[in-house]
Image (spheres, rainbow, N blue to C red):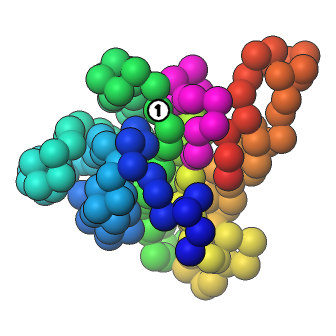
Amino acid sequence: MSDRHSSIAGTRMLIIGASSGIGQALALAAHSRGAAVALAARRVDRLSELADRLGGTAHELDVSDPRAIESVISAVAANFGKLDAVVFTSAVVPFALIEETDVETWLHAYAVNAVGASHVLRTALPHLTDSATVVIASSHDVGRPARGCGRLSREQGRARRDLALLAGRTSRDRRDPGQRRPHL
């Protein structure tokens, strides 16, 4: 591993979905390499325990709530000044065929997996450093859905396209002058 990847000491990182799984593992790894971490997730009890252990901050966040996203990112940015990295690992996975899924389940999954991820990205933009890294974790099924997982593939594919579109912008983009290009 090169120094560029192994030395993240001092990196100011927001990890969304950090109460378990990949988000929690990333928080532990980032902290062990010297990053300052702000953690966000719905399960604030688990999150607070992890934040205390890492010397970070815990923020209760339901990513299906746009106002909550704005509030958490604003608080984290106020604490850190700027963000060097934002990682989105939250996901809702309704493993069911479309004919077995009610519309409320569909809307909630879309609100988390596509709209939530995109709104985190949009809200974080003004707070990113010029060399910031943004990661939206998604399933390997994006683009090749398995039976019962089609919605997850579509929703995460949407978030992945939003991130790719943003990364392709330049400061000369007439639609959004001054926008920075986070690293993928």
Give the residue drawn at x 16%, y 45%.
55
Left or right of residue 96: residue 23: left
Left or right of residue 159: residue 119: left
Give the residue drawn at x 81%, y 15%.
177
Give the residue drawn at x 83%, y 41%.
168
Determine the residue located farthest toward the bottom in the rendered image.
147
The quarter of the picture where residue 130 lies is top right
The quarter of the picture where residue 160 lies is bottom right
Taking 128 as reference, is 90 above or below it?
below
Taking 53 as reference, is 80 above or below it?
above
Q: Which of 103 and 27 lies nearest the eye of the viewer?
A: 27
Which residue matches tag 1?
Answer: 83
Element marked by disc 1: strand
* Rendered-image quadrant of the N terminus: bottom right
Q: Which of 7 and 94 lies nearest the eye of the viewer?
A: 7
Taking 107 as reference, is 80 above or below it?
above
Give the residue drawn at x 48%, y 43%.
86
- Please rate how many residues cluster around mark 1, counting C-alpha atoms within 10 Å: few if below 14, some from 14 to 19, many from 20: many
Residue 110 location, x and y as percent? 53, 50
Residue 13 location, x and y as percent? 40, 43
Left or right of residue 21: residue 122: right
For the record, the magenta segment spans: 123-134
Instruction: Determine if residue 35 is in view.
Output: yes
Residue 57 location, x and y as percent? 20, 38
Residue 123 location, x and y as percent? 52, 26
* Tally of marks: 1
Determine the residue located farthest toward the front in the rendered image.
3
Q: Is residue 130 magenta?
A: yes
Q: Amino acid at mark 1?
A: Leu
Q: Which of 88 and 32 lies nearest the eye of the viewer?
A: 32
